[in-house]
Amino acid sequence: MASVAKGFRYSDYLSLAGRRAADIEKMSPRARKAYLHRQLHEVEAQIGSMVDRLTADAEEASEVFAGPEQLLSEQRWSSLFDLGYLMAEREALAEAIDRL
């Protein structure tokens, strides 16, 4: 999964996706729908992976006293923002598929 790979940055992903947007417009409606379904499945897998990781981190923190600095770490905030982005992307993909 790309979301758990070290060094993965969503900005790089977005720039690649932006370059491919012109190709998507040239696809037939059937191919476009298949492409969007595949993207939707990938996003849902990333969401599931991120939720599992955040849940495991929360359970680990509850077993051992975690101070405020651990609960509000930069990595945790980053994961929460990425999760919000992925959920918005999932909604946008679902809407696009429904419109086709």
Image (cartoon, rainbow, N blue to C red):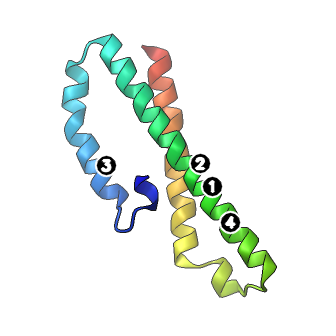
Q: Mark 3 points at which residue?
A: 14
Q: Mark 4 points at which residue?
A: 56
In this orientation, which residue lies closer to the viewer: 36 or 88? 36
Determine the CA span between mark 3 and mark 1.
21 Å
Q: Earlier in the sequence, mark 1 or mark 4?
A: 1
Crowd around label 4: few <14 · some 14–19 · many ≥20 (10 Å): few
Q: Residue at x 42, y 13 (%)?
A: 100
Q: Which of marks 3 and 2 is nearer the N terminus?
A: 3
Q: Earlier in the sequence, mark 2 or mark 4?
A: 2
Discs 4/3, front: 4
52 up-or-down from 64: above or below: above
Q: Do the residues labelled 2 and 1 touch (CB within 8 Å)?
A: yes
List x then y, in percent, for residue 78. 51, 67
Determine the CA span between mark 2 and mark 1.
5 Å
What label sits on residue 51 in the rendered view?
Answer: 1
Looking at the picture, which amino acid does disc 4 mark?
Ala
